[in-house]
Image: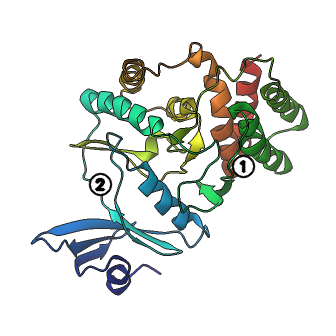
Amino acid sequence: MSPDAGTVARLTGRDVVGGGRGFPPRFTLDDRAGGTTEVVVKDGAADPGSIPAEAAGLRWLAVPGGPPVPEVLGADDTLLVSTAVPGGRPSTDAAQELGHRLVALHGSGADAFGAPPPGGPEDAWIGHTGMRNRPCDGPWGAWFADERVLPYLRTARDRGAVDARGATVVERVCERLHDPADDLAGPAEPPARLHGDLWSGNVLWSAEGAWLIDPAAHGGHRESDLAMLELFGLPHLDRVLGAYADAAAGAGVPLAPGREHRVPLHQLFPLLVHAVLFGGGYGSRAVAAARELG
């Protein structure tokens, strides 16, 4: 059932003056300053717990100098009311600005790898499947193997999206991530504040620049967000990545050498998530990525 105006008013504490159509439904609220605010209502009833996780993530990602994100105006266990993103088209200027702002977002940090946003649940979501946000005191590589790659590999194998031989290839990568003498994970970095599901569909372009929506936010490695952008493509991606590299270097936190060679490693997680959700084609791509790592 679509949310009605009364529910939106209850969640936001504001008067509803119009709307209620479309998917997801949009409403117009009185902004208490003589104007109105357009909002979007997301229904997460099909994915229990996803709305509290998303609301906490949006609040956490709203950092000074970071990419703009919708403002959370109200939420309960199943409904999220947030400001609508104005329409627009991709541009090279907006792409460059996005690269700069992602540096600010990642640099805002997290308490630990795997840490959820403040107030966010441990059992969160990415897409329409579960994702556990549990802080880890150890290095990124071991956490990534144990909390991001292996759980989804097991599910993908159980569902037939990855066969036994392919699973062995991915498991070998995870063994390397646990080996302190192996440099596969790259130089150690502090936990970054990640969007966590940064594919092109979660980047909305407006006249004001690029906005981020639908996060699976957690503490992780900044290269993971960049690798997901590369996995599914983005308008003016080269401009985004170039601007990111320049801004990171200018801020005294340059990307570590060899990032390009680690892209398949960071893409293992989203590929296995997609294998769980959509089947074997993505499983084959995950195994191919693991093989590419040597």
Q: Disc 1 marks which amino acid?
A: Val
The residue located at (77%, 28%) in the rendering is 177
Identity of the residue furthest to the left in this view: 34
Q: Depth check: 159 or 268 in front?
A: 268
Left or right? Give the position of 204 relative to 107. Answer: left
Left or right? Give the position of 73 relative to 196. Answer: left
Identity of the residue furthest to the bottom in this view: 6
Q: Name the residue that disc number 1 marks.
A: 276
**Measured from the top left, where is residue 132 in percent x and y?**
69, 54
**Measured from the top left, where is residue 59 in percent x and y?**
42, 57
The residue located at (64%, 24%) in the rendering is 188
**Measured from the top left, where is residue 71 in percent x and y?**
34, 59
Q: Tag 2's secondary structure?
A: loop
Q: Depth check: 154 or 75 in front?
A: 75
The residue located at (75%, 46%) in the rendering is 152
Q: Residues within 10 Å of mark 2 (few under 14, many from 20)?
A: many
**Measured from the top left, where is residue 26 in percent x and y?**
31, 69
Mark 2 or 1: the one toward you: 2
Q: Residues within 10 Å of mark 1 (few under 14, many from 20)?
A: many
Q: Earlier in the sequence, mark 2 or mark 1?
A: 2
- Where is 53 relative to 227, above or below? below
Marks 2 and 1, how far apart at CA: 30 Å
The residue located at (49%, 55%) in the rendering is 57
Q: Depth check: 217 or 167 in front?
A: 217
- The quadrant in which residue 258 appears is top right
Q: Name the residue that disc number 2 marks.
A: 85
Q: Which mark is residue 60?
A: none
Q: Is residue 89 visible?
A: yes
- The quadrant in which residue 4 appears is bottom left
Q: Disc 2 marks which amino acid?
A: Val
